[in-house]
Image (tube, rainbow, N blue to C red):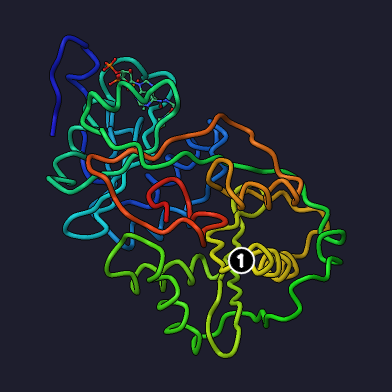
Amino acid sequence: MSYHSKFDLRTKVVVRQSTERSEWEELVRLANAENWNETISDHEVYFNFDPKGIFVALVDGKPVGFTAAINWSDDFAVGGLSIVNKQYRGRGIGHALWEERLKHVGDRNFMIFSAPNRIEANKRLGFTAEICRFQMMSGKVNKAKYLSRTENDYNVIVPYEEGHFDGVLAYDNLIHYINPRDRFLRLWFAHKNKSRVAVAMAADQVVGYGCIYPTYEGYRIGPLYADSGDIAAGLLRELLDTIPEPQPTITMAVFSDSAGFKLAKELNLSCQTPYETAMCRREIQFRTDKIYAVFDTQLTFV
Ligand SMILES: CC(C)(COP(=O)(O)OP(=O)(O)OC[C@H]1O[C@@H](n2cnc3c(N)ncnc32)[C@H](O)[C@@H]1OP(=O)(O)O)[C@@H](O)C(=O)NCCC(=O)NCCS
């Protein structure tokens, strides 16, 4: 679709769905210029789930901006990855992308992530429900020091295998708000073929699970779901043990002032950016007491 407006540039802007991996490479380049710390494979999980959910703006055939919304179900969508090349900002391209995205989302309840100074503007756009605040935490971890801690030896923590899937799915079903969930979990666990998943078991029951995967710089942990802080710490140790570097940079997104926040501090992670707020058109319900780190904060959350 072509856009025409007061800006000459917009007469040359075309916004359409993006299905080309080469265009996503430009998205990742723009994102990392903003320190978003992402790889193409992070996004492929989402685009494999909803291949119609990513939009590109082209000027003279060249990609200059992106946005995305993943329709997780008939009644729920999450939006993110809004970025326009610095040279083209302030000329209506962001708005043109958001219009196309809204057509894709339709009447679904729609979640976005808001910087503190955008909350009131987002409320005026219809995102009236403030769901929760979270922090992106990151830093260098002294793995040897963390691995030497010994609590939690009464739970069994094992690397994930296919046989764990039903138990992990059942555990995950206690927590999230996206239905159905199995397709997404399978995509996440296959994440770039590089993710490592650990499962905590007690008397043959799953009592937690977590995932670590390499990203643009270092590794990201998400999700980290557990019945207790001890179990979450045990899962963290198992996950850290799978990666080669002695002092990796680790990133995880945690709820503000939560047990996950305390755990991230113990890992030596700190807040690199101000808190963000998950906002929706309508309230959603999900269980927070087992969440020590969320999946991600681009196109999904819990
Ligand atoms: C946000 C962004 C995509 C807007 O693109 P753009 O082409 O400059 O947008 P437009 O020219 O269509 O309009 C600018 C609008 O974006 C709004 N905007 C600015 N920063 C924003 C932000 N962080 N999140 C959402 N909207 C933002 C402006 O208020 C303006 O809206 P208004 O016309 O209603 O006042 C662009 O500024 C950008 O890439 N910023 C860096 C990445 C970023 O912060 N993305 C949003 C993360 S949630």
Q: Is residue 212 above or below residue 109?
A: below
Between 170 and 86, the one nearer to me in the picture: 170
Dot 1 lies on which element? loop
Q: Residues within 10 Å of mark 1 (few under 14, many from 20)?
A: some
The image position of residue 107, as x and y in percent, is: 12, 45
The image position of residue 224, as x and y in percent, is: 56, 62
Determine the residue positioned at 13% across, 41% down. Answer: 103
The quarter of the rendered structure image containing the N terminus is: top left
Amino acid beneath label 1: Ser
Q: Is residue 276 above or below residue 3?
A: below
Determine the residue positioned at 58% across, 42% down. Answer: 257
Residue annotated with mark 1: 228
Query: Along the horizontal axis of the image, is 84 left or right of 11?
Result: right
Determine the residue positioned at 31% across, 47% down. Answer: 78
> In the image, ligand 1 is in what quadrant?
top left
The image position of residue 12, as x and y in percent, is: 21, 22
Between 159 and 124, the one nearer to me in the picture: 124
Give the mark count: 1
State which quadrant residue 181 falls in. Answer: bottom left
Q: Mark 1 near ligand 1 (CB under 8 Å)?
A: no
Determine the residue positioned at 36% across, 19% down. Answer: 88
Query: Along the horizontal axis of the image, is 186 left or right of 216?
Result: left
The image position of residue 215, as x and y in percent, is: 59, 52
Between 289 and 99, the one nearer to me in the picture: 289
The quarter of the rendered structure image containing the C terminus is: bottom left
Query: Along the horizontal axis of the image, is 288 left or right of 75?
Result: right
